Image: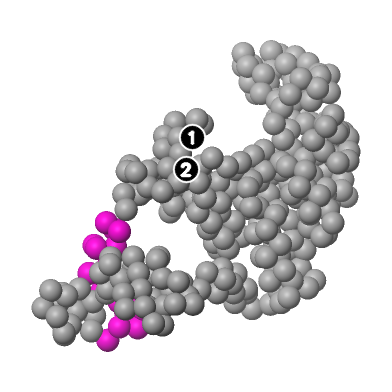
Amino acid sequence: MNDHDDLRKDSTLALLVGKRDLTGERRVREQDRGNPLAASSTLNRLELGIPKSAISDRYKRIAADNEAMDRLLVDLFLESYRKPPRKIWLDLDATDDPLHGQQEGRFFHGYYRCYCYLPLYIFSGEHLLCARLRTADKDASSGSVDELQRIVGQIRARWPKTRIIIRADSGFCRDAIMAWCETNDVGYVLGLARNKRLQQALGKEMEEARLACERTGETARCFRDFRYRTRKSWSCERRVIGKAEYLPGKANPRFVITNLSPRDADAQYLYEDLYCARGEMEKFIGNEFSRKPRRG
């Protein structure tokens, strides 16, 4: 709301939404002059309006069509291409949206060490396909299958031959997401949190990396491609890539899980070129969406 009261004065935004009076000097009410766009109270009505009753409501006549807004984000992405691409990546992530008041759904998140919301974002390159506000008492992956089902369905209706691969950190390494991808012919490359069993499986490669690091004084890494299944939480065995890395004085093992075949990508290429590319998506979130206080 605070931002809106400043942005309503922006002539560029007024131009983009089709306003003719770009300075707001011709507004009917004197209190609105100099502001080409609506006040925060109008935005509040948009948030509170109920579609079925908006037409007869005196104060909340503006109602959001949430499904249409969701479709629009994907439509804009589809329209940005002249022809369907052979392959696209969908990057999923969650981040903190800090709170500084007594907002509804306020919850303290231990990882971020603050009261916040925990929105879910899905990007393809620089295109935002989903921004779903959620309370912070949920798992980072909460709702991901529903959003993927909606987005992938909309994309395939226009691009039936385009291959779709999702990518995310270990917060999204959940059996429900992987099983949905496997059932619906969607690829995935996901971070996998390390544990004792995984580190034991990578023991030989870690020793090789340690010896190479001690010999050269520089970071050394090698990879192992193997099959792995959790004792309880996964429904099947899956392909895991282990990165055995040793920095001077420090071991740094990492793991990735995927349903891509070795023909699609060998272990090193999959980790270094495919998985690590998700860092580009994190920059979009860091620059545009996070660290902005919500006060109202």
First in residue order: circle 2 vs circle 1: 2
- What type is the residue that disc 2 sits on? Asp
Camera-side residue: 262 or 32? 32
Quadrant of res 61: bottom left
Q: Residue furthest left?
A: 30
Residue bearing the label numbered 2:
96
Camera-side residue: 73 or 219? 73
**Which residue is painted at 44% across and 31% down in the image?**
113
Say whether residue 161 is left or right of residue 251: right
Q: Is residue 270 magenta?
A: no
Residue span colored magenta = 1-20
What separation in Å lies between label 2 and label 1 (alpha carbons)? 9 Å
Q: Are marks 2 and 1 in contact (CB under 8 Å)?
A: yes
Quadrant of res 139: top right
**Which residue is painted at 48% across and 75% down in the image?**
51
Residue bearing the label numbered 1:
109
**Which residue is painted at 27% across and 86% down in the image?**
20
Q: Does residue 270 appear anywhere in the picture?
A: no
